[in-house]
Image (cartoon, helix red, strand yellow):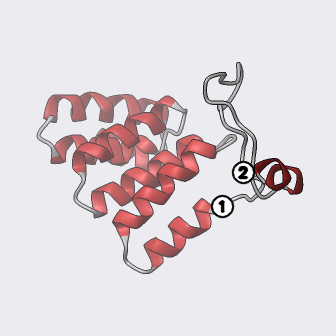
């Protein structure tokens, strides 16, 4: 019965004892879940915790814009009063090259009482965003 279900595509065949060399050890779902859209909808419905979770899932499957996703996730974390999670997410955004993540990184570091790190992050962000309104704000 299982072989018949695999043959028609109801079940996917996977062997957890032999993970793939490149990529996930389980086959990808043929159905793509629109995590970004669901996260945006959760934000619009004033559900920041749900948005934070969904942005995390979107970042897991992201093919390129992971930095922006981590910034959005950090914003949702701050709205959910998950300041420590916001620090981690904004840091990931910075790691992925999203310079706009510096702003939320500074805010979240200040929120958890890590002022010296916030000042250092503000300095780095101000250098990268020099001349822009956000760069000026970080400088101040």
Front residue of 48 and 67: 48
> x%, y% of residue 29?
72, 51
> Residue 33's mark?
1
- Category of crowding for the residue at label 2, using alpha-carbon neighbours closer than 10 angstroms: few (below 14), some (14–19), many (at least 20): few
Front residue of 7 and 41: 7
Is 62 situated left or right of 87 in this image? right
Q: Residue furthest front?
A: 1
Q: Residue at x 37, y 60 (%)?
A: 76
**Dot 1: element:** loop
Front residue of 52 and 114: 52
Q: Is residue 133 shown to the viewer in this render?
A: no
Q: Quadrant of residue 62?
A: top right
**Dot 2: element:** loop
For mark 2, what is the residue?
29
Nearer the camera: disc 2 or disc 1: 2
Q: Is residue 54 above or below residue 37?
A: above
Q: Are marks 2 and 1 in contact (CB under 8 Å)?
A: yes
> x%, y% of residue 94?
46, 34
- Category of crowding for the residue at label 1, using alpha-carbon neighbours closer than 10 angstroms: few (below 14), some (14–19), many (at least 20): few
Mark 2 and mark 1: Cα distance apart in space: 9 Å
Q: Residue furthest bottom?
A: 45
Q: Residue at x 70, y 36 (%)?
A: 14
Q: Is residue 121 shown to the viewer in this render?
A: yes
Is 49 situated left or right of 68 in this image? left
Q: Residue at x 22, y 29 (%)?
A: 117
């Amino acid at each position: 019965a299982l072989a018949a279900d695999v043959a028609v595509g109801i079940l996917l065949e996977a062997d957890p004892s032999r993970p793939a060399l490149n990529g996930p050890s389980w086959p990808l779902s043929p159905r793509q879940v629109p995590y970004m859209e669901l996260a945006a909808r959760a934000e619009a419905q004033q559900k920041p915790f749900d948005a934070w979770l969904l942005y995390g899932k979107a970042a897991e499957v992201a093919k390129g814009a992971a930095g922006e996703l981590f910034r959005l996730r950090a914003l949702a974390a701050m709205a959910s009063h998950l300041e420590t999670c916001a620090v981690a997410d904004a840091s990931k955004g910075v790691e992925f090259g999203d310079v706009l993540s510096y702003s939320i990184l500074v805010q979240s570091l200040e929120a958890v009482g890590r002022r010296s790190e916030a000042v250092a992050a503000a300095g780095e962000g101000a250098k990268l965003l020099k001349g822009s309104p956000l760069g000026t704000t970080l400088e101040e």
